[in-house]
Image (cartoon, rainbow, N blue to C red):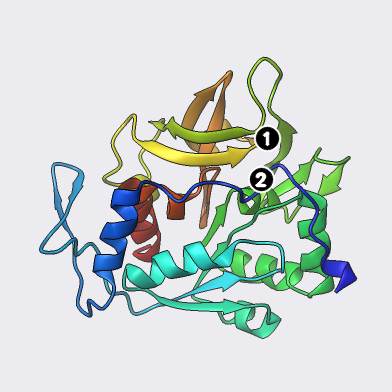
Amino acid sequence: MAMFRRRKGFCDGDYGNGTGRRSRSLRRLRGLRRQKFSLRKSTLRPVRSWRLCVENESMITIVDYHLNNLRSIENTLRRLGQDVRVTSDADDVRTAEKLVLPGVGAFPDAMRNLDVLGLGGPIIERVRSGTPILGICLGMHLLLDESEEFGSNRGLGLISGRVRKLPGGVHIPHMGWNQLQPRRKDRLLEGVEEGSFVYFVHSYYAVPRDPGAVMASTDYGIQFPSVLASGNVWATQFHPEKSQRVGERILLNFAQL
């Protein structure tokens, strides 16, 4: 449909899928029914044939607003033992136990699609009622008040702040592996070591009004927020589903919130 056209944005999805060794290892995971993980000294360690999963009774609802890369996050969560629902139905959002808001593309197109599909209001209502939400990449930006991408555009307003473009002097987009520097303890980052590498693809970054909302930052010309948390709202600038073992740990932590 024309209303859901894809514009080349700055939180786009043209990134790699990790090493070949990891891909082969993931294939070996398929078909395992019972999975678990063990934690020792804050490090995620494999237990018998890479069994890293935690079964969880609550369902994770991934919001499909026709401008997001859903397959990677859906497959990763399912492989990690989670019950997942992908939906564009506002009623599903209203009854969600946990929400994931992924995204690739341009901020104004994403907000337009959320409005056209009638999803923006239900997301706000459900999160304000206490439901945990995880925004990923563009999904992180959508959680803020506004963005300067392609002009001034309003966001969902679940984290007070603004989205700005990365400054000059570095290659844009910021694409590839970079390190996390945790600033504060948070359940989403439990077991994630300082300096862990995660995968980024973006040209804009979030600037929360409250500096206390920054749980981790990353250096790329400037120190920008790479993990935000405010109440029951969490967000990552990087793609946890593309960040191998560290990203899997973060997703498992979210599943257990």
Q: Residue shown at 80%/53% (left/top)?
A: 7
Determine whether, in the image, residue 7 is placed left or right of residue 138: right
Q: Residue shown at 66%/48% (left/top)?
A: 12
- The quarter of the image holding the C terminus is bottom left
Residue furthest out toward the bottom: 91
Q: Is residue 131 visible?
A: no
SS type, badge 1: loop
Q: Residue shown at 78%/42% (left/top)?
A: 147
C-beta proximity under 8 Å, tags 2 and 1: yes
Determine whether, in the image, residue 257 is placed left or right of residue 99: left
Determine whether, in the image, residue 149 is placed left or right of residue 73: right
Q: Residue shown at 49%/62% (left/top)?
A: 72
Vertical comparison of 35 with 37: above or below: below
Q: Earlier in the sequence, mark 2 or mark 1?
A: 2
SS type, badge 2: loop
Q: Position of residue 202 (x, y in %)?
A: 63, 39
Residue type indicated by callout 1: Ser
Q: Position of residue 252 (x, y in %)?
A: 34, 60
Label number found at residue 11:
2
Q: Quadrant of residue 183?
A: top left
- The quarter of the image holding the N terminus is bottom right
Vertical comparison of 70 with 147: above or below: below
Please state the total of marks drawn on the protein image: 2
Q: Is residue 17 visible?
A: yes
Q: Position of residue 111 (x, y in %)?
A: 79, 59
Q: Which residue is mark 1?
A: 203
Q: Position of residue 18 (x, y in %)?
A: 40, 47
